[in-house]
Image (tube, coloured by chain):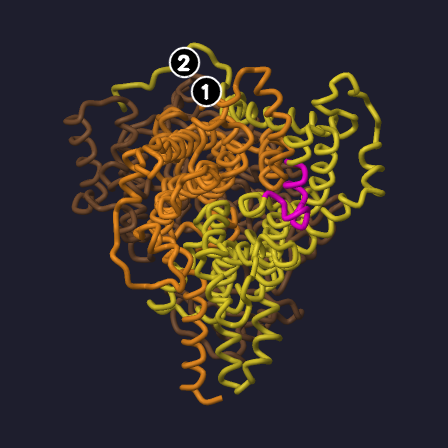
Chain colours: A brown, B orange, C yellow
C-alpha cells in the first residue's frame, strides 16, 4: 500500500514501557491526528518512525518498503519537531534547503523549491534571517517548510502549532488541511488540542500510556468514544460521567441519572450494575420553566467562547455540567433537566463503551 | 564604619593585592632590560638605561662574554615548547572531540570507564606513570623523541578536552542533530556540519586551556626529555645552573617563556573559569 | 509526489551500534597507555628493585611499605607534605575568598583587576619558582634587599632550612591564590541577589550576612576549590624542585620530590614506587570526593540555567 504502515512499535526506557505495540496505517493523502495527553508516547512514536529513537522496535513500511532497519537519512520522510529544532547557525533559507542539499539538487533547483514553499507559508520575506531573529510563528513555519520542501511521501508533524500564538494558530488551522492534501503525503499530526484534531483530521488515533485507545474518524471519537479515558480526553468541557440506574423498558433499557433517562437498544444488562452514563455538556437538555421535570440548582456560571457553562446540582444531589447558548442565567436560580440529546453508556468495571443513545451518528456500538 | 573610610580601606587592600601579584612579573620584565651591572647594584634602582642586549643574545643564540662566545640554545627550547604544545593539543582535539561526542550522545559502559580512568589520572601523581614510562621508553627507543613526548603529553591535554567538550555536547539538544539526519544527511555530515560548529566555543576554550597547561608543564619533560628536546620550563632551569650565564638573560628567558601563556590567557579569559573547574562553574 | 528518491544502502545492518566504540578507540589506547605504567608502578612497589643492583631484584610483598613505618625520612616526607598542603591551601582559601569578596561587584574596574590577578596562575609554576629565586637571591634580589630594610639582614630564604618552607609556600600562594579567587568570584556572582537585597533592606549587619548567608551559599564552591587545591598541593613537584630540589637537606622533601630523587639519584625503583603508591591512595580518596562535588556543582548550574 502506498503511505505509511507501522506494526507492533514498542519502546522501553529502562523498566518503563513507553510504547506497547502500536499498529496504524496512514494512506497517501490522508491526515491522521495522533492525540493524547503529555507522556502518552506521541513524540516517542514519531521518533520511532523517523528512526531517531534507539530504544524502539517494530516494523515501519513506507510505500510498501520496510525501513525500520535503515538509518534516518535513508528514510523518505519529513519531520517538524515540537521545539522547531532549527539550525541556529544557518539562515532560514539554508534551514529549509537542508533536505534538498542532502538529495544533491542543483542550486538553481533548490532556490526554486525553497522560494515556492516559503511563499506558500508566507515566510518568503525572512529567508535571510537566522532563527534567533525570527518570531515563534515564523520559526514554526520555517520548520514546516523544511519538512515539506522535499515532498516526502510521509510527513510527521509533532505539535507544530503548540508554540504559536492564538491568532496564527487559528489561521493555520484553516490553511493547513488543503496544503497537506495538496502534497499527497501520508501525514501524522500530533496535538493535545481536541478542536485542532477535529479541524485537521481525517482520522484520530487516541494514544494514552503507550497504547492506542481508539482509531476512528474524528466525529466518531467525539460521538462514540471507545472508553471512559477517551471520552474524558476528547472534549472541553469534559463529558459528564454519572452513575446510572438501569430500568428495562420493553426491548430497550433506560439509564437514569440526574433527571435524564436516555434509552438504549441492544443492551445486555445481565451482570451490569450501575454503569456510567456519559453526556456531553452541550447534550444536556434544559427547560427554563419547571415543567414536571426534575429541578436542578445552578451553582456557577462560566462563559466559554460563545456559550455559557453551567455547574448544576440535580434533584438527586449529583453535580453535572451543562452548556447553553444565549443569555446567561443567574447562579442560584433553578432549571429543569429535560433529558439528554445524545448519551453514551460505559461499563463501570473496564470503562469500555457499551451503547449509544440518540440519533447523531450511525455507529456500531 | 562610614562609607568613605570603607572605600579607602578597600582601595588600599586592592592596591596591596595587585602589588603582590603583579610585582614579580613586572620586576623580571624590568630585569630583562638591565645590564648585569645594573642588576647587581644594591639598593635596586628604578632608573637605569634599558638595553636589548639580553634579548639579542637569546634570539641570536650567541653570547659574547669575557671568556669568549657561548652558544645559547634557548631559542630551541622555545621551539620545543611550541611544537610540543601545539602538536599535543592538535592530537588531543583529533582524538578527544569525537570521543567526547560519543560519550555525550551514547550511553555505553566502555565510555564511562574511559572517561573515569582519564579523569582520575588527571588527579593522580604524574610520576606514578612517568617513572615506569621512562624505563619503558628506553626499551622502546622512545626516550627523547618528539613522538614519545607528544603521546605522553596526552595525559595532560586529553582529559581536559574530553571533559570540557563533552559538557558542551551534552548541553546541546540532540534534536537539532536528529532533524539534520531526518533531512537526509549521514551521521558524519551531521557531526561535522552541526555538532562541531555548535560546540565551537567549547572546543576553542578547551584547546586554549590545554595549550596553556601543556606549555607550563615541567615534570613530563624533565623525566622524559634530554637537552635538545626540552621545553622552556626545563630549559630555563638548566640555563640557571650553567656557569657564565648572565642574570639579565635569565630574566629575558623567563619573560619570553611566560609571554605566550599570559597573552593567551588575556585573550581567552572568559573561558578560563569554566575550563579550570572542568565546566563545573560558568565564567 | 516527489520525482527523486533517496539512495538505499545495500546492507540493512545498523552500523550505528559500532559508532561509539569506533569514536572512542584512540582514547581507549591512551587509557591503556596510562594503565600499564600504573600497574607497573604498583608491582614495583612490591619489589626490592634497585637499578644499581639488578640481581637483587625480588618480590617482597608489602616490605617497602612496612619499612616506611620505621623510616624517619618517610615520616619527614609526610610531615613536610602535610605542612605544605595545609599552609598553602589554608592561606589561599582565606586570601582568595577575601579578594573575591572585594571584587564581587561587576564593575569595569573590578573586572580589569580580576583579569590582571589571573596572570600569576598562567605562569608555569617552575618558572614562577625561578622568578622568586631571582628575587630572593642573597646578592642582588630585590626581596632580600627589602627585608634587610626591616632588620632581617642575611635572610637566606630558600637556602636556609628554617625559612625554605616559607619561601616555597609564598611562591605557591602567588601562583594559585588566583585560582581560588576566580572560582569563588564566579560562585559569588552566580548567587541569587534576592536574599542579599532582603538583608540590606532589613538592615541586617554585614558580618551576620557574611557568615550566615554568603558563606553557606558559597560552600559548594569553597569545597570544590579546596579539594582541587588539596589534590594539587599534596603532590606538588614543580615549585619545590625548581627552587631547591628538595633541600636544603630534606627540609622540603615532599612526596613527589622524594620519589623523583629516590628513582634518579638513588636508583631505588621499589622505594620510589611505594612512596608514589602511598601518595596515590591519598589523591584517589580526595579526587573521588572532588568528582562527586563537581557533579553536584554542575547539576546546580544546570538547575539555574
Which residue appears at 64% of the width and 67% of the height?
A318
Q: Nearer the viewer, residue B25 or A154?
A: B25
Instruction: Report helix, strand or loop for mark 1.
Output: loop
Across and down, in percent, residue C220 comes to 60, 59
Q: Say whether marks 1 and 2 touch (CB < 8 Å).
A: yes
The residue pinned by badge 1 equals: A70
Across and down, in percent, residue A101 comes to 26, 27
Find the magenta span and give its range: C245-260
Across and down, in percent, residue B178 comes to 42, 34
Specify the farthest residue to the front.
Answer: B67
Helix, strand or loop: magenta stretch: loop
Instruction: Report helix, strand or loop for mark 2.
Output: loop
Q: Chain of mark 2?
A: C
Q: Nearer the viewer, residue B149 or A168?
A: B149
The residue pinned by badge 2 equals: C9
Mark 2, Cα crowd under 10 Å, few <14 / some 14-19 / many 20+, is few
Q: Is residue C254 magenta?
A: yes
Q: Chain of mark 1?
A: A
Which residue appears at 58% of the width and 69% of the height?
A293
Amino acid at each position: 500500500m502506498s503511505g505509511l504502515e507501522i506494526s507492533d512499535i514498542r519502546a522501553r526506557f529502562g523498566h518503563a514501557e513507553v510504547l506497547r505495540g502500536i499498529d496504524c496505517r496512514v494512506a497517501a493523502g490522508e491526515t491522521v491526528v495522533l492525540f493524547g495527553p503529555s507522556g502518552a508516547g506521541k513524540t516517542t512514536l514519531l521518533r520511532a518512525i523517523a528512526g531517531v529513537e534507539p530504544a524502539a522496535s517494530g516494523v515501519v513500511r513506507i510505500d510498501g518498503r520496510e525501513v525500520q532497519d535503515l538509518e534516518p537519512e535513508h528514510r523518505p520522510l519529513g519531520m517538524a519537531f515540537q521545539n522547531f529544532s532549527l539550525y541556529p547557525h544557518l539562515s532560514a533559507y539554508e534551514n529549509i534547503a537542508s533536505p534538498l542539499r542532502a538529495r544533491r539538487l542543483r542550486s538553481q533547483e533548490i532556490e526554486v523549491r525553497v522560494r515556492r514553499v516559503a511563499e506558500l507559508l508566507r515566510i518568503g520575506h525572512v529567508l535571510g534571517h537566522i532563527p534567533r531573529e525570527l518570531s515563534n510563528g515564523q520559526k514554526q513555519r520555517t520548520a514546516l517548510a523544511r519538512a515539506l520542501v522535499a515532498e516526502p511521501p510521509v510527513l510527521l508533524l509533532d505539535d507544530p502549532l503548540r508554540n504559536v500564538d492564538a491568532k496564527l494558530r487559528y489561521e493555520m488551522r484553516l490553511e493547513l488541511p488543503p496544503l497537506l492534501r495538496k502534497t499527497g503525503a501520508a501525514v501524522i499530526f500530533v496535538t493535545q488540542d481536541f478542536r485542532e484534531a477535529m479541524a485537521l483530521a481525517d482520522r484520530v488515533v487516541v494514544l494514552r500510556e503507550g497504547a492506542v485507545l481508539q482509531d476512528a474518524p474524528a466525529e466518531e471519537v467525539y460521538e462514540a468514544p471507545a472508553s471512559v479515558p477517551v471520552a474524558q480526553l476528547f472534549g472541553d468541557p469534559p463529558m459528564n460521567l454519572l452513575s446510572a440506574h438501569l430500568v428495562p423498558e420493553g426491548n430497550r433499557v433506560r439509564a437514569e441519572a440526574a433527571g435524564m433517562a436516555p434509552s438504549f437498544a441492544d443492551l445486555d444488562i445481565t451482570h451490569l450494575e450501575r454503569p456510567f452514563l456519559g453526556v456531553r455538556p452541550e447534550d444536556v437538555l434544559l427547560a427554563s420553566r419547571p415543567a414536571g421535570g426534575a429541578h436542578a440548582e445552578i451553582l456557577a456560571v462560566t462563559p466559554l467562547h460563545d456559550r455559557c457553562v453551567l455547574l448544576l446540582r440535580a434533584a438527586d444531589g449529583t453535580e453535572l455540567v451543562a452548556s447553553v447558548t444565549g443569555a446567561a442565567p443567574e447562579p442560584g436560580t433553578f432549571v429543569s433537566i429535560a433529558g439528554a440529546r445524545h448519551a453514551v453508556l460505559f461499563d463501570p468495571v473496564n470503562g469500555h463503551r457499551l451503547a449509544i443513545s440518540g440519533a447523531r451518528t450511525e455507529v456500531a456500538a | 564604619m562610614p562609607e568613605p573610610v570603607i572605600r579607602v580601606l578597600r582601595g588600599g587592600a586592592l592596591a596591596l593585592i595587585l602589588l603582590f601579584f603583579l610585582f614579580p612579573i613586572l620586576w623580571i620584565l624590568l630585569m630583562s632590560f638591565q645590564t648585569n651591572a645594573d642588576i647587581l647594584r644594591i639598593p635596586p634602582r628604578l632608573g637605569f638605561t634599558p638595553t636589548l642586549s639580553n634579548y639579542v643574545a637569546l634570539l641570536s643564540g650567541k653570547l659574547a662574554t669575557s671568556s669568549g662566545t657561548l652558544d645559547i640554545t634557548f631559542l630551541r627550547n622555545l621551539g620545543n615548547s611550541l611544537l610540543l604544545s601545539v602538536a599535543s593539543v592538535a592530537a588531543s582535539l583529533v582524538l578527544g572531540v569525537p570521543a567526547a561526542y560519543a560519550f555525550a550522545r551514547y550511553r555505553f559502559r566502555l565510555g564511562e570507564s574511559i572517561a573515569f580512568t582519564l579523569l582520575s589520572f588527571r588527579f593522580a601523581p604524574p610520576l606514578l606513570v612517568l617513572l615506569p614510562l621512562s624505563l619503558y621508553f628506553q626499551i622502546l627507543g622512545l626516550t627523547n623523541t618528539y613522538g614519545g613526548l607528544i603521546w605522553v603529553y596526552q595525559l595532560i591535554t586529553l582529559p581536559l578536552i574530553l571533559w570540557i567538550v563533552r559538557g558542551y555536547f551534552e548541553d546541546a539538544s540532540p534534536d537539532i542533530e536528529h532533524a539534520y539526519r531526518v533531512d537526509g544527511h549521514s551521521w558524519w555530515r551531521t557531526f561535522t556540519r552541526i555538532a562541531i560548529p555548535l560546540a565551537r566555543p567549547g572546543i576553542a576554550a578547551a584547546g586554549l586551556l590545554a595549550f596553556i597547561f601543556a606549555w607550563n608543564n615541567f615534570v613530563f619533560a624533565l623525566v622524559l626529555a634530554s637537552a635538545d628536546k626540552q621545553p622552556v620550563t626545563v630549559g630555563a632551569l638548566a640555563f640557571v645552573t650553567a656557569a657564565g650565564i648572565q642574570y639579565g638573560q635569565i630574566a629575558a628567558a623567563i619573560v619570553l617563556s611566560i609571554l605566550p601563556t599570559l597573552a593567551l590567557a588575556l585573550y581567552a579569559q572568559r573561558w578560563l573559569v569554566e575550563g579550570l573547574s572542568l565546566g563545573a562553574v560558568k565564567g | 509526489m516527489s520525482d527523486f528518491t533517496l539512495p538505499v544502502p545495500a546492507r540493512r545492518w545498523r552500523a550505528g551500534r559500532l559508532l561509539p566504540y569506533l569514536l572512542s578507540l584512540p582514547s581507549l589506547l591512551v587509557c591503556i597507555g596510562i594503565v600499564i605504567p600504573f600497574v607497573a608502578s604498583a608491582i614495583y612497589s612490591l619489589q626490592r628493585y634497585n637499578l644499581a643492583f639488578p640481581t637483587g631484584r625480588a618480590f617482597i610483598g608489602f616490605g617497602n611499605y612496612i619499612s616506611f613505618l620505621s623510616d624517619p625520612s618517610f615520616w619527614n616526607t609526610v610531615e613536610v607534605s602535610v605542612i605544605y598542603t595545609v599552609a598553602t591551601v589554608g592561606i589561599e582559601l582565606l586570601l582568595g575568598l577575601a579578594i573575591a569578596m572585594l571584587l564581587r561587584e561587576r564593575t569595569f574596574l573590578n573586572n580589569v583587576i580580576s583579569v590582571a590577578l589571573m596572570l600569576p596562575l598562567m605562569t608555569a609554576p617552575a618558572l614562577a619558582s625561578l622568578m622568586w629565586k631571582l628575587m630572593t637571591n642573597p646578592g642582588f634580589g630585590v626581596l632580600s634587599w627589602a627585608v634587610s630594610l626591616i632588620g632581617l639582614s642575611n635572610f637566606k630564604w630558600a637556602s636556609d632550612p628554617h625559612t625554605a618552607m616559607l619561601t616555597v609556600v609564598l611562591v605557591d600562594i602567588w601562583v594559585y591564590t588566583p585560582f581560588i579567587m576566580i572560582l569563588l568570584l564566579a560562585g559569588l556572582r552566580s548567587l541569587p541577589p534576592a536574599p542579599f537585597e532582603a538583608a540590606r533592606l532589613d538592615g541586617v549587619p554585614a558580618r551576620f550576612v557574611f557568615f550566615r548567608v554568603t558563606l553557606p551559599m558559597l560552600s559548594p564552591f569553597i569545597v570544590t576549590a579546596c579539594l582541587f587545591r588539596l589534590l594539587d598541593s599534596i603532590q606538588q613537584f614543580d615549585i619545590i624542585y625548581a627552587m631547591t630540589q628538595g633541600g636544603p637537606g630534606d627540609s622540603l622533601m615532599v612526596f613527589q620530590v622524594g620519589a623523583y630523587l629516590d628513582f634518579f639519584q638513588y636508583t631505588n625503583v621499589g622505594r620510589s614506587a611505594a612512596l608514589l603508591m602511598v601518595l596515590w591512595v591519598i589523591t584517589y580518596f580526595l579526587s573521588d570526593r572532588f568528582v562527586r562535588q563537581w557533579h553536584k556543582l554542575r547539576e546546580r548550574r544546570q538547575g539555574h540555567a
